[in-house]
Amino acid sequence: MSSILLATWNARYPHSAFGLRYLLANMGELRSETELLEFGIQDRSVDVLEQVLQRSPQILGLGIYIWNVAVATRFVAELKRVRPDIVVVLGGPEVSYEWETQPIVELADYVIAGEADLAFATLCRDLREDRRPPEKIIAAPVPEPGQLALPYIEYTAEDIAHRVIYVEASRGCPFTCEFCLSALDIPVRAFPLDAFLAAMQVLLDRGVRQFKFVDRTFNLNLRVSRDILSFFLECGIPDLFLHFEMIPDRLPEPLRELIVRFPPGMLQFEIGVQTLNPDVGERISRRQDNDKLAENFRFLREQTGVHIHSDLILGLPGETLESFADGFDRLLALGPHEIQVGMLKRLRGTPIQRHEFEWKLVYSPEPPYELLQNSTLDFQTLHRLRRFARYWDLIGNSGNFVASRAWIWHAAASPFAAFLDFSDWLFQREQRTHGIALPRLLECVFTYCVERSPEQTDSIAADLWRDYTRGGREDRPHFLRSFDLPPARDMQRGREGQPQRQARHWT
């Protein structure tokens, strides 16, 4: 039994609770009696309750996020009915702001707002000594990174084998983009680099080969980002995968010189473009040099093997259907391997709320608080774009249609307009956005493209077959059986040594 329990619900099993591992690592003398449990949001609350009660904790700390607040609220309500004596402490971004009307906050005993790495252990000591804080909301002082014990020893062998290993070299963000909680987290604070790299070496020695950096602006500090890239480049391990979030318009020559030395598939850059409309960018306090952004994308695509994941947001105040379409087409022309199209969300505490009246921003009251309509995009249009985003994920981002997807917008002036037409057609045909099997989706793409370019039928069939066999499949879908196509094994020859992401997203 553990007298102190830390728990949360991850969105998926491979995800890991990075924040709770920080709390665990910084428990000091209480570490030996503290345990961490992770659940999935699909787990029934009564099953979670059983596991918690088996350990009979005195204190239960829960990590609350936008994706798990609903299931967590039900769990805390049930726990308090069965064991009201267990002290429930909440933390995490979902309860760090605007807590006054949140049912889960009303149910809990305490809430630590902000970075709770040290504050949680302090509260546990106070509770153990019967020094109960008089206020439910505890504002955590912002810790300096050098004060913190690093959490990487808390990753277990099972984590290393099956979960995403999150790491961070810095916290904070110098920018003030109003849709993002990082707008409130200034300045950037770097962890002591020698200690951080030593911890990375320990993870490498334990067999970690995939690292996901959660730094909001990895390429902000040139010296630090250069030293980290050099460390991984010089470790000599060939099967590494490193994920970084990058500022779109900052890629100075010293970083370029390092990046080109990495083998294809080792680096993934998540580049948050969000909007290419300068008026919208200024309105939401997002500073971005779009010309420099385009230059950096061209460099990455033409001279490196970096896998580029980019983001655009639907529904930003002042963004119209036409301006979003223009931004999408411009970004697509720069050749990122993935364009994640996401709906604007009203995250608690973010400054985006100041635009709600002027731009008539209407959000769902339920997590994840997605935009329903605004003054430039009505509900029907936004819902249509929501389907667009889902189908784009299935076809544009999945890696299953690398050679064939361009047939959807073949000869069209605007790829966005053509794909929007396709998404309308596909929804009318299938009446769903989920649960479409790949062979069925392949046939739909074939039918749509042939209807619009019948003179290209053989070429469309050949590209769909190339895509279908890309993942090692050898069965031939029935609608392709009448075409003269090479055997699947001939199509796959030469791809054996390619990294997974290159095999999925490169022609």
Image: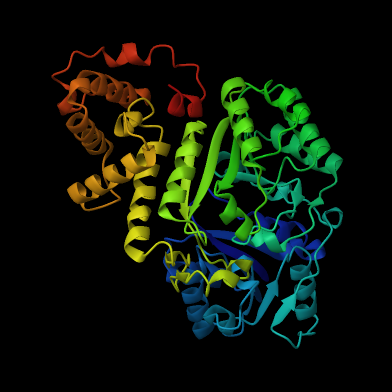
The quadrant the C terminus occupies is: top left
Residues 147 and 226: in front is 226
Above or below residue 451? Residue 172 is below
Question: For the point 74% across and 29% down, which residue is it?
Answer: 255
Residues 362 and 160: in front is 362
Residue drawn at point x = 69 percent, y = 50 percent: 154
Residue 287 percent coordinates (x, y): 67, 50
Spot the residue most to the bottom: 134
Name the image quarter holding residue 118: bottom right
Relative image position of residue 346 (x, y in whole percent) = 53, 67
Colour scheme: rainbow
Q: In this view of the protein, which residue sits in the foreground, 24 or 113?
A: 113
Q: Residue at x 76, y 85 (%)?
A: 132
Q: In this view of the protein, can residue 474 be seen by the observer?
A: no
Specify the quadrant that holds the N terminus: bottom right
User: Is residue 255 in view from this perspective?
Assistant: yes
The residue that appears at 73% across and 66% down in the rendered structure is 116
> Taking 46 as reference, is 235 left or right?
right
Percent position of residue 117, x then y:
75, 62
- Reply above or below: 38 against 251: below
